């Protein structure tokens, strides 16, 4: 696991009315602080990536469909520099993925329906000076191929 990345299997509590799933609580070790909450959608087969933050920590939860979340540790001096992590999260695997600053990340919609990811970052989005640094989704700077791995 990349240094600083944490995951937590989320518990779905169903009853005859529906279900409830806690996504992030301040008494969990994965919680740092609250900045804002937003939802992002990714269409089937589409890749959104790569980017990282210098200050912000992200907390991803896929609440509809399935997404492949991929992390790459580009941090110089990190004990896990160069390491890749893949997480398959969503309705079939409810999970929180905590992504620390400096870790490149992106995701791909892997279900037949739109995948919806809720993010609870530690910082508010700064419209004048965004804490967001990007690379193209398909770049030779990151040793990762977004293609489906059949076998």
Image: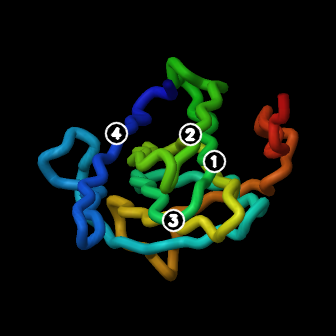
Q: Nearer the viewer, mark 2 or mark 3?
A: 3
Q: Which residue is mark 1?
A: 68
Tell me whether circle 1 and circle 2 mark residues in contact (CB < 8 Å).
yes
Other-residue count near label 2 (Cα within 10 Å), few / some / many at <14 / 14–19 / ≥20 = some
Other-residue count near label 3 (Cα within 10 Å), few / some / many at <14 / 14–19 / ≥20 = some
- SS class of the residue under badge 1? strand
Q: Quadrant of residue 3?
A: top left
Q: Which residue is mark 3?
A: 64
Other-residue count near label 1 (Cα within 10 Å), few / some / many at <14 / 14–19 / ≥20 = many
Instruction: Please give the name of the residue rendered at 40% of the width and 53% of the height, measured from the top-left corner.
Output: 59
Nearest to the observer: residue 6 or residue 22: 22
Distance (Cα) linking label 2 and label 3: 15 Å
Nearest to the observer: residue 144 or residue 108: 108
Q: Is residue 129 above or below residue 82?
A: below
- In the picture provided, is 90 more to the left or to the right than 18? right
Q: Position of residue 142 (x, y in %)?
A: 77, 38
Q: Position of residue 55 (x, y in %)?
A: 42, 54
Instruction: Please give the name of the residue rendered at 48% of the width and 58% of the height, measured from the top-left corner.
Output: 62
Q: Which residue is mark 2?
A: 87
Coloring applied to the structure = rainbow
Mark 4 or mark 1: which comes first in sequence?
4
Instruction: Please give the name of the residue rendered at 69% of the width and 54% of the height, measured from the top-left corner.
Output: 110
Q: Which mark is residue 8?
A: 4
Mark 2 or mark 3: which comes first in sequence?
3
Nearest to the observer: residue 70 or residue 75: 70
Distance (Cα) linking label 3 and label 4: 17 Å
């Amino acid at each position: 696991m990349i240094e600083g990345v944490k995951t937590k299997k989320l518990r779905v509590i169903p009853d005859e009315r529906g279900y409830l799933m806690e996504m992030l609580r301040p008494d969990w070790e994965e919680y740092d602080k609250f900045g804002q909450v937003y939802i992002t959608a990714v269409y089937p087969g589409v890749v959104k990536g790569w980017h990282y933050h210098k200050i912000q920590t992200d907390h991803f939860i896929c609440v509809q469909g399935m997404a492949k979340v991929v992390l790459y540790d580009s941090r110089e001096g990190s004990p896990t520099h160069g390491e890749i992590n893949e997480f398959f999260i969503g309705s079939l695997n409810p999970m929180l993925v905590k992504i620390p600053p400096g870790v490149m990340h992106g995701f791909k919609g892997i279900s037949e329906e739109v995948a919806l990811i809720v993010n609870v970052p530690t910082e508010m989005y700064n419209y004048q000076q965004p804490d967001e640094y990007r690379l193209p989704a398909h770049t030779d700077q990151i040793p990762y191929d977004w293609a489906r791995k059949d076998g």
